[in-house]
């Protein structure tokens, strides 16, 4: 029986271990990333309500309906805010507001709006 570990086996073992650690971190991060605090989000979303909390609000220029966010899917809100923050989704005002948000802020705000139900 040969118990000698080759260099290739060591590299494979190290790679598998590193991959396992990365997957564990990703799972931990993604589950905690969706654990926002609605109460904290309510305070952080205060400025959002200036546009997104006005019933039937239509922006003047350019003209478009400003969406209500209450009841929206949390995952959608998280992805949208992160895209505004990364400037891969365009809207100057939203980009400016999202630029100041941490991942925790985004999770909290998304949790708050998702918990509101349709409005």
Image (cartoon, rainbow, N blue to C red):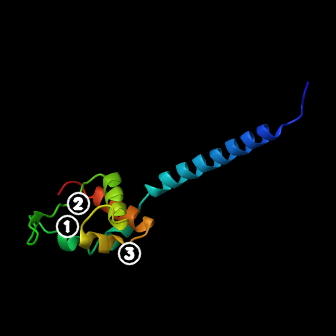
Q: Quadrant of the C terminus?
A: bottom left
Mark 2 vs mark 1, CA separation in Å: 6 Å
Secondary element type, mark 1: helix
Residue 91, given in percent of the width and then of the height, sits at 24, 67
Q: For mark 3, does the 10 Å Cα neighbourhood hold few (<14), some (14 to 19), or many (20 or more) residues?
A: few
Mark 3 vs mark 2, CA separation in Å: 19 Å
Secondary element type, mark 3: loop
Residue 41, given in percent of the width and then of the height, sits at 35, 67
In terms of sequence position, does the residue under pointer 2 or pointer 1 come before the other? 1
Which is more toward the observer, 98 or 3? 3
Mark 2, residue position: 69
Quadrant location of residue 51?
A: bottom left
In terms of sequence position, does the residue under pointer 1 or pointer 3 come before the other? 1
Q: Which residue is located at x 48 percent, y 52 percent?
A: 30
Mark 3, residue position: 100
Q: For mark 1, does the 10 Å Cα neighbourhood hold few (<14), some (14 to 19), or many (20 or more) residues?
A: some
In this rendering, which labeled residue sits more in front, label 3 or label 2?
3
Which is more toward the observer, 100 or 114? 100
């Amino acid at each position: 029986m040969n118990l000698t570990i080759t260099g290739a086996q060591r590299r494979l073992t190290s790679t598998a271990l590193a991959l396992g650690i990365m997957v564990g971190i990703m799972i931990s991060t993604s589950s905690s990333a969706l654990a926002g605090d609605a109460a904290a989000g309510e305070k952080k979303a205060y400025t959002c309500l200036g546009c997104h909390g006005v019933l039937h609000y239509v922006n003047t220029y350019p003209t478009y309906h400003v969406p209500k966010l209450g009841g929206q899917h949390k995952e959608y809100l998280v992805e949208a805010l992160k895209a505004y923050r990364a400037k891969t989704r365009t809207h100057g005002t939203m980009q400016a507001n999202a630029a100041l948000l941490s991942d925790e802020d985004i999770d909290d705000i998304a949790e708050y709006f998702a918990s509101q139900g349709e409005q």
